[in-house]
Amino acid sequence: MSAVQHPITQDDITHFLNQQGWGEATYQPLGADMGLRRYARLKRGNQTALFMDMSRAGILETGLDAFVTLAQHFSKNGVNAPKIIAYDLDTGLSIIEDFGSISFGQARKQGESDSLIYQKATDVLMAIRDSAKANTLELNGYQDTLIRKRLHQFVDYYMPLGAGRLTTQADQDEFQAVLKQIEKTLPPCPMAICHADFHLENLMWCPDKPDGYGLIDFQDAFWGPMPYDLLNLLEDARQTVPADIKQAMKDRYCNGMNSEDRAVFDDWYTYMSMHFHCRVIGLFIKFARENGGTQFLDHIPRLQEYIRNNLQNPHLKPLQEFMSRHKVSFEIILS
């Protein structure tokens, strides 16, 4: 779906809600998320639902059509996606099931154990993985996603600080060439549907649902390397997962793999982890520079540690040599 050609007004929203029989519901705005989506909680008698406005999506991000397709796919295959009550692809407006306001992250803060939280989250990932054995939904491949394309942010934003000099297009070209060189040395990676932003805030704590969860924010899903979502969960830039739980969840996800398949999975896990943290470390610095979001700089040391650890993997030696050649430090302190 292309983006709506004119801004959606409150009159448009009122018309849509009236059409769907929710015009008399109370309307509590919940604000926007990190993307281009806006939400409100609707209450009609004893019923609640979420109003979702994706009218601004479709150019920089996927639109409502992708959300609907994926929600229907997941629901048919045992993944707790929200039921879609009503939607209009022309406006990007919809009404969906309300999973409540407690995320897995909030449940963790309220006292649910790390072992339970991460076991449930890992089981959701396994259900997503098992929902499709091939790319029947014709999702974008990883190489075609904005996630992959934004990996350039490492060279553009972190490398000038880490190397103490301005970077050039030649640096960017060399960085990308090194990544391609590494990929050629790795065996083919197992592929699966990847949520694209799988962390504790995109899982809702729903004790009354099967397996106790609700999955949200999956509209940017792609068909890509199987380890991607797992490392997103276990190596969240904003919090450190205990090492024993991290290992246990990797073992849980990989249960049933033979030793050869597990070795391939682990190598790709490390390689995709490098992608993930190089992109995010650049993103955080970009955000701080352009938007004053200095709170994200507090997470830079964690990302630097992830990258230092990844560079010890023999498969990533060409990248380690790139960092050494250009004197890129992962010890610098930003504040």
Image: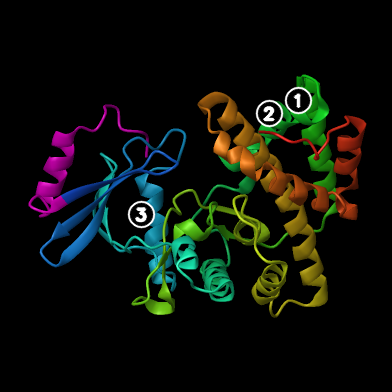
Tell me which amino acid carries mark 3: Val
Tell me which amino acid carries mark 1: Pro
- The residues bearing labels 1 and 2 have C-alpha atoms spaced at a distance of 6 Å
Q: Earlier in the sequence, mark 3 or mark 2?
A: 3
Tell me the magenta residue range. 1-26
The reply to whether discs 1 and 2 touch (Cβ–Cβ < 8 Å) is yes
Whether residue 136 is visible? no
Residue position marked by numbered label 2 in the rendering:
157
What's the residue at 53%, 57% (across, down)? Answer: 199
Label 3 vs label 2, nearer the camera = 2
Whether residue 128 is visible? yes
Residue position marked by numbered label 1 in the rendering:
160
What's the residue at 65%, 58% (across, down)? Answer: 240
- Rendering coords of residue 260 (x, y %): 82, 72
Label drawn at residue 247: none
- Rendering coords of residue 282 (x, y %): 66, 35
- The residues bearing labels 3 and 2 have C-alpha atoms spaced at a distance of 35 Å
Please state if 16 lies on the left or on the right of 187 as rendered: left
Label drawn at residue 68: 3
What's the residue at 9%, 48% (across, down)? Answer: 18
- The residues bearing labels 1 and 3 have C-alpha atoms spaced at a distance of 41 Å
Please state if 261 lies on the left or on the right of 27 as rendered: right
Q: Work out whether residue 1 or residue 285 is closer to the camera in this orientation and state it.
A: 285
